[in-house]
C-alpha cells in the first residue's frame, strides 16, 4: 500500500426521501468489507470502498495505480491492471487479467470479461466481452472506434472517405 491509500470507506450509497418528507437523502449503510488477495499493489491515494451488501474483492496479483477509485461491491479478478485515474463504479465485475488505461471509467453494474482491455479515457457503459479491446466515449470495440474517429476527422476536414475534397 502506498501513501494515502484508503481501504474500507463507505460506498456512495443514498436513498431519496419522498418530496412530502422534504426531499433530501438518507445514507444507506455499507455493511460489507474489503478483501484483498496476495501480491496486490495499491498506488498512492487510491480508494477502495467497502461493500454495501457484499464484500468488495480485489484478486491476487492485481496492480492498482495512483488515484484509482474502486466503488462498493466491485469484484476484481486476478492479475488485473488499473492505471491512474481509473474509476470503477459500484457492483462492477472484472474478469482475470483485464487491463485499464489511465482515466478509464466504468458505469455501475457492468461486466468486464477476462483479458479485456479498456483504452485510456474510455467511458464504459456496456458489458465488455472477454478478450476484447474497447475505447472511446461511449466505449465500443477498438477497431470500430478508430474507424469512426478517422471518418469523423475526414468529414470535419471537408473530405470524403476516399480522401478527396468534397
Image (cartoon, grey):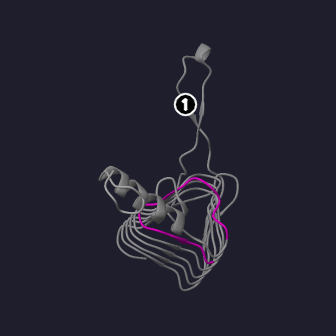
* Residue at the (66%, 70%) spot, across then down: 113
Element type at mark 1: strand
Q: Quadrant of the N terminus?
A: bottom left
Q: Between 145 and 43, which is closer to the camera in this rendering?
A: 145
Q: As displayed, is residue 79 above or below residue 162?
A: below
Residue 7 shows up from this direction: no
Q: Residue furthest top?
A: 20
Find the magenta span and give its range.
115-129
Q: Position of residue 128 (x, y in %)?
A: 63, 64
Q: Callout 1: 10 Å neighbours few (<14), some, many (20+)?
A: few
**What residue did someone put label 1 on?**
25
Q: Quadrant of residue 129?
A: bottom right
Residue 37 shows up from this direction: yes
Q: Between 86 and 23, which is closer to the camera in this rendering?
A: 86
Q: Main secondary structure of the magenta part?
A: loop
52 left or right, relative to 149: right
Q: Position of residue 79 (x, y in %)?
A: 57, 82
Q: As displayed, is residue 136 above or below residue 133?
A: above
Q: Position of residue 95 (x, y in %)?
A: 65, 73
51 left or right, relative to 155: right
* Residue at the (55%, 51%) spot, across then down: 11
Q: As displayed, is residue 110 above or below residue 34?
A: above
Q: Is residue 1 magenta?
A: no
How many numbered dots are placed on residues in this image?
1
Q: Residue furthest right?
A: 54
Q: Position of residue 130 (x, y in %)?
A: 67, 73
34 left or right, relative to 5: right
Q: Is residue 128 magenta?
A: yes
Q: Between 16 and 161, which is closer to the camera in this rendering?
A: 161
Q: Between 21 and 73, which is closer to the camera in this rendering?
A: 73
Amino acid at each position: 500500500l502506498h501513501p494515502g491509500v484508503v481501504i474500507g470507506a463507505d460506498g456512495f450509497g443514498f436513498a431519496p426521501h419522498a418530496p412530502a418528507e422534504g426531499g433530501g437523502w438518507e445514507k444507506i449503510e455499507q455493511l460489507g468489507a474489503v478483501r484483498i488477495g496476495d501480491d496486490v499493489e495499491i498506488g498512492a491515494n487510491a480508494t477502495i470502498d467497502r461493500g454495501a451488501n457484499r464484500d468488495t474483492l480485489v484478486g491476487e496479483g492485481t496492480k492498482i495505480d495512483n488515484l484509482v477509485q474502486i466503488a462498493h461491491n466491485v469484484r476484481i479478478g486476478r492479475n488485473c491492471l488499473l492505471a491512474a485515474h481509473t474509476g470503477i463504479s459500484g457492483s462492477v465485475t472484472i474478469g482475470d487479467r483485464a487491463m485499464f488505461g489511465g482515466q478509464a471509467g466504468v458505469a455501475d453494474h457492468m461486466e468486464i470479461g477476462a483479458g479485456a482491455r479498456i483504452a485510456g479515457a474510455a467511458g464504459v457503459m456496456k458489458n465488455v466481452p472477454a478478450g476484447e479491446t474497447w475505447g472511446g466515449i461511449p466505449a465500443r470495440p477498438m477497431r470500430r472506434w478508430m474507424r469512426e474517429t478517422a471518418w469523423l476527422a475526414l468529414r470535419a476536414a471537408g473530405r470524403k472517405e476516399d480522401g478527396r475534397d468534397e
